[in-house]
Amino acid sequence: MGRIRELVRGLRTSRNGGMSGFFRFVGLFGLAFGVFAVVLLIFGKNPLKAYADIFSSTLGSAYGFSEVLVKMIPLILTAVAVAVPSRIWLINVGGEGQLYVGALFATWGALTCSNLPAWILLPWMFLLGFIGGGLWASISGVLRAKGWASETISTLLLNYVAILLVNFFVFGPWKDSESANYPQTAAFVHAAILPAFGGTRLHLGFAFAFLALILFHFVLSRTRWGLEIRAIGGNAEAARRNGIPTTRYIVLLMFIGGGVAGLAGMSEVSGIQGQLRPSLSPGYGFAGFLISWMAGGNPLGIAAAAFLLAIIASGGDILQMAHGLPGSVVNILMALILFVVLARRGWKVGGK
Amino acid sequence: MVERIDELSQRYGLQVDPTAPVWRLSIGERQKVEVLKLLLADAQILILDEPTRSLAPHEVEGLFRVFANLRRDGYAVVFITHKLPEVLACADRITVMRRGRVAGTLAGSEATESGLVSLMFGGGGIESPHRGGKTPREGVQPLLELRQVSTRAQGEATGLQEVNLTVLPGEIVGVAGVSGNGQRELGDVILGLERCARGTKYLWGQDATHWSVARIRASGVAFIPEDPLGMAVVAGMTVQENMALADTRKYARQGGLSMDWAAVREDLERSLKRLGFTIPSLDLRVGTLSGGNIQRVVLAREMARNPRLILAFYPTRGLDVRSAVAARELLVASRDAGAGVLLISEDLGELFSLIDLLVVLFRGRIVGTSKPQEITVNKVGYLMTGSRGGTWVE
């Protein structure tokens, strides 16, 4: 028993390592890229050429680079959504669903308050997006705090419910009567669109993402609540005996995590799509989970991992267009990364 | 397989349904399964560590019949327990362990309860200091009062049963008992971590049955747990951060946006100085400290708040002699300053040298209350082990 506790403690402390975290990160990616190169060879493609194309198309031009940053926004936000509850060992696999509900709430704001000026409407949509995602995640939080259901399972299952919920609205009550037969809402009024920089698609959501990272770091390391959260994460038993309300934190951190994912949804509908569609996210919520785990919940690590995954996601288009590979081939690379991340953790648990 | 199980269970009186899933079996039946597993693995020596802990009396008798059958067939059984009537009922030879050493071995036929008790607790040699009787217990507002408090037993743990307990200002109340007889639950109930299934709890004269842990702690209850690393401190955080945990509200600045680490250090250093403890550094992670230093950190943190009521579980465990003396003096000094202390210990020597009132906990019940000078160590030993010699007089 004591040894198990020792082991768990070792795992907990190892996850915040600064430098070692960085090397782990680079090593994981190297491994995944290596295996993917073999996959490309099997397809009869030159992996070096493919990788060069991916990097030149994303990092080689200003527009390509801005597209990478655009993709980083939902990735960072959904990663923070996973990282926040993970500080007290809650596993939020529901970033995708929370993103959808956040988008749904924000869309409601955009459609019903369309005569408001932008400086009121956008903050209002921001708030709605946060509350929507937060409430959705709180369902799992309350279930967990009461000891009724594991948050891992309930957040995962609620993803599907959330997506169906969005489908219901875009196929039903909110369907735009003017768009032939597409399941989508009417286009947002101009005031409900997040402003973009220059001629790119890079919108104000980028500021949300970096603000979320900075706040996450600041709250955890500096504030009273951060201290209490770290205490619960370090030793929940001791935290309870010191009068820290652990069950309240379970609901609260799930709410905040879900809220941040909801912001990803809000920024997608408002900054990119300009209307609500069922194909709102190509799996940002799941990629966010991957990023948070890869980074061990470290804010800088999240930014770096989101950057790399954004390059891979953008690079998928290039592989499809220039190399005649199916677009879904990058999913293999993402899956490989997930695999090495999980395997690495498995070695750690089994190895000691 | 089923046949072998049936044969063995017939032979030794270990009847269980071999095809039933284990979760459906009672705890007594699961115990039989454990013994059967050993027999199926052709074990010759069976070691049973407190096997009777969660058994009903008739199941205990059944287990002893199994022992008798096993002995007849040449198996050796090592039966570990703290309940004297049980060993006397079934053992051929009895070895008494005390603080990790063998205190003596007796043949079962020669052993008596009193003989065993004096081996277990070291017999006489403990003088009870004459401090008691200075204040009458009547008419004083108790700091803590439990009235008919019961808790739900969780799993194998012992629930409290109709516990009545009061701690007055300027008094050290000792709780004697073999660990696992409800001490942990007693502490948890007082701290507000575990709900009272029945009964009421008063702190400072107010009904505190439904107070939160935070409120109880903030109102002046200090807690020195049996397992500091598991129950009081966060190993991955520094000494200073652990100090701040006891009262995060007090040390918060700007409404919680930052922490006043200077104030935390100051309070901690003052408290350490008052206790005469030194810690290598306040910036070390608590997990890197020795057990004794961790205990010092906990003591210093808890005493820094000038508590009115101190719950001390085995407070000298892991401390060297000098620090143990300092910790005891601390409890006495707090008592003399008007605080109440609830001291939970297995060490009767420590209890008798410090306390003003002794209660004995056995299987979640208080089976005796007495002033230390009115009771002998042997008598307490009887009560702690549930022996017959311990019929109680109030």
Image (cartoon, coloured by chain):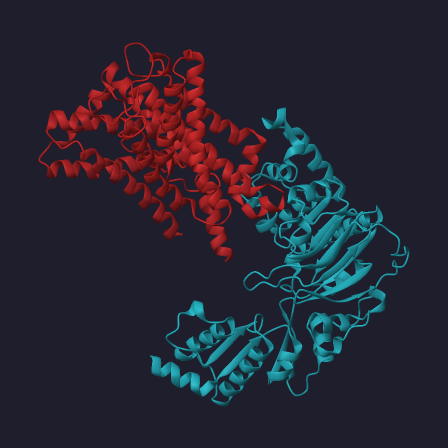
Residue A272, x across and y down, in percent: 30, 20
**Along the horizontal axis of the image, is B41 left or right of B273?**
left
The colour with which the image depicts chain A is red
Which picture quadrant has residue A25?
top left
Residue drawn at 64 percent across, 47 percent down:
B293
| Figure label count | 0
One can see residue A16 in this view: no
Which picture quadrant has residue A208?
top left
Q: Quadrant of the C terminus of chain B?
A: bottom right
Q: Is residue B50 above or below residue A101?
A: below
Residue drawn at 75 percent across, 50 percent down:
B202
Residue drawn at 41 percent across, 42 percent down:
A91
**Along the horizontal axis of the image, is A293 left or right of B124?**
left
The colour with which the image depicts chain B is cyan
**Along the horizontal axis of the image, is B266 left or right of A34?**
right
The outermost residue toward the bottom is B72
